């Protein structure tokens, strides 16, 4: 991952109503980085899939979850955080097969389960010539 | 906040055409499920899902399509998906659903 230039954070409630907002923010950021339209659509889908899963899991203690978009010169790294420690390893390979397939196919690097303080991390790098 | 999901149903004699426009995500998927399942359950005709005006779909929506196909097969009906945009067709290919559905 190259040096981060800018960081954008949004905190969303656990409501399906606002998942599209995460896509909208991603679209603007990816456009600024220089991703082509098709890649922007791919990134929006991957980001939205994780949001949908987090919303469907929900939380009894946290008011919302935070998406951090780390913007580098030619890459985007996205991490999801939540104060509720119970929200970890949210994807189940059997139940969430379609979502996992989609996320891992569309992004360059994906961590769906880890020991760090974030829920999910994924990144996409701008291809040379695109 | 999602782009509204709109439905247009046309009876074509031996088939029913459901045209979708807008976005299918976790917010709008329940509406899709109710409409689609209702058509499969209450019509004897085959089903055509026209996605020409569908701009976005996620795994929730794809799962509903799979459920509708299963129901259609139980009723010995065909289900065809038409007019997929490239970005949506890509999701069918990634998930292998392009081999499960009849896509025209």
Image (tube, grey):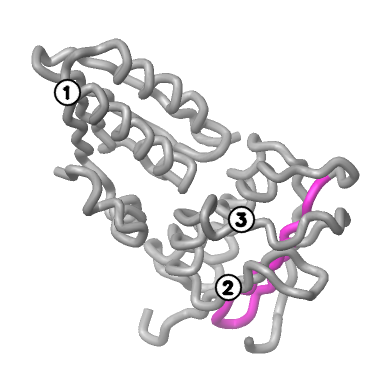
Q: Is residue B69 above or below residue A39?
A: above
Between the C-alphas of marks 3 and 1, the distance is 34 Å
Q: Chain of mark 3?
A: A
Q: Chain of mark 1?
A: B
Mark 3: secondary structure? helix
Is the C terminus of chain B in the top left, top right, bottom left or bottom right quadrant? top left
Which label number is shown at residue B46? 1
Q: Which mark is residue B98?
A: none
Within the image, what quadrant is residue B87 found in?
bottom left
Secondary structure of the residue carrying tag 1 is strand
Residue B95 horizontal/vertical position (percent): 36, 57
Q: Which quadrant holds residue A57? A: top right
Q: Is residue A74 magenta?
A: yes
Residue carrying label 3: A50
Measured from the top left, where is residue B47 in percent x and y?
Answer: 21, 25
Q: What is the magenta range?
A: A64-80
State yes or no: residue B26 in magenta.
no
Please tell me which residue is depicted at 32% across the width and 16% down the height of the picture. Answer: B41
């Amino acid at each position: 991952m190259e040096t981060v230039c800018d960081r954008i954070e949004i905190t969303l409630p656990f409501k399906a109503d606002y998942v599209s907002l995460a896509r909208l923010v991603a679209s603007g950021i990816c456009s600024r980085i220089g991703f082509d339209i098709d890649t922007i659509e791919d990134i929006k889908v991957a980001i939205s899939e994780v949001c949908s899963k987090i919303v469907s899991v929900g939380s009894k203690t946290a008011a919302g979850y935070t998406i951090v978009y780390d913007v580098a010169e030619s890459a985007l790294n996205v991490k999801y955080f939540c104060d509720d420690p119970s929200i970890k390893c949210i994807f189940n390979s059997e139940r969430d097969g379609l979502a996992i397939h989609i996320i891992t196919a569309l992004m360059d690097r994906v961590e769906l389960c880890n020991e760090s303080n974030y829920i999910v991390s994924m990144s996409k790098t701008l291809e040379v010539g695109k | 906040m999602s782009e509204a999901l709109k439905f247009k149903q046309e009876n074509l004699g031996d088939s029913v055409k459901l045209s979708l426009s807008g976005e299918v995500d976790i917010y709008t998927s329940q509406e899709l499920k109710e409409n689609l399942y209702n058509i499969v359950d209450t019509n004897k005709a085959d089903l055509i899902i026209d996605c020409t005006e569908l701009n976005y779909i996620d795994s929730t929506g794809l799962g509903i399509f799979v459920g509708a196909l299963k129901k259609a097969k139980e009723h010995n009906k065909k289900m065809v998906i038409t007019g997929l945009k490239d970005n949506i067709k890509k999701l069918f290919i990634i998930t292998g659903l392009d081999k499960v559905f009849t896509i025209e």
